[in-house]
Amino acid sequence: MKVINLTEEYKQLYFVCLEDWSEEMKEAGCHKEVWYNKMKDKGLQVKLAIDDNGKVGGMIQYLPIEYSFVEGKDLYFISCIWVHGHKKGRGNFQKKGMGKALLHAAEADAQAKGAKGIVAWGIPLPFWMKASWFKKQGYAKVDKQGLLDPVLLWKPFTDNAFPPKWVRLRKKPQIIPGKVTVASFLNGWCPAMNMVFERAKRAASEFGDKVVFQEIETFDRNVFWEWGIADALFIDGRQVRTGPPPSYEKIKKLIAERVKKLGY
């Protein structure tokens, strides 16, 4: 097994997070590719893990924290590390050391670039970006939000590294009287979140002028800081949990319930 930098050969595979077999991934559109093309000159790094048979089984993407959805300075931020674990498509590559190899490669690279530490986010649920896994790799929890929300973890490289912190939600989308307001925030970095955006946009369009769809692109740092959130879905001011991504049918049902309450 070896870890390599992303090459032209594997870009399309990276854009769908190694899930080139997935029909769902087609719903995510080209937002991640657009995001990558904007970020590649701002310090974004992508590495892939390849097994002894030449198959890509894992990936990691990390970038200067100043361009992430976390507040910090002189640190790198791991927005995603993923070892393909589905039986479908490429097969299950987990429990073979790919995750550790990718993480160690990213840490060494960030340190070589002069970073004072590296940051990751983790969730308490055992299916992706597990906080417990990062803790086993020497990361310490540094900030949290709600009980089931992601926690922020880090590994400082120097004694003068300043701890990062979550950026909190600063305001919610306004509700338009007499309409159902569907507001979707889009950064582009994650196909799962891009999928939510596309599903919400499509579902909102099913209700004609009864529903107003608001697209809020947060790649622009000023827009991100204005709202304090990078990716999210709100229906009439209420945030919808988007991890794992709700289906198109569920999003449409939530909108329909609000439409019905308006008496349409």
Image (spheres, grey):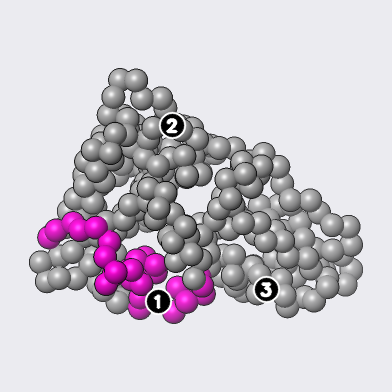
Determine whether, in the image, residue 106 is placed left or right of residue 162.
Answer: left
- Mark 3 and mark 1 lie on one chain; the one further toward the N terminus is 1
Q: Is mark 3 on a helix, strand or loop?
A: helix
Q: Which residue lies furthest to the front in this view?
A: 41
- The picture places residue 149, in percent across and down from the top left corner, at 51, 44
Q: How far apart are marks 3 and 2 (CA)?
A: 39 Å
Residue 138 in the image: above or below residue 27:
above
- Amino acid on which disc 1 is placed: Ser
Mark 1: give few (<14), some (14-19) or many (20+) Cα within 10 Å: few
Q: Distance between the residues labelled 2 and 1?
A: 37 Å
The residue carrying mark 2 is: 73
Q: Disc 3, disc 2: CB below 8 Å? A: no
Q: Distance between the residues labelled 3 and 1?
A: 21 Å
Residue at 43% of width from left, 60% of height from top? 36
Q: What element carries label 1?
A: loop
The residue carrying mark 1 is: 22
Q: Is residue 4 magenta?
A: yes
Q: Splitting the image into 4 quarters, where does residue 212 fall? A: bottom right
- The picture places residue 218, in percent across and down from the top left corner, at 59, 52
Chain part drawn in magenta = 1-29
Residues 224 and 41: in front is: 41
Can the viewer see residue 15?
yes
Q: Is residue 15 magenta?
A: yes
The residue carrying mark 3 is: 203
Residue 6 in the image: above or below residue 20:
above
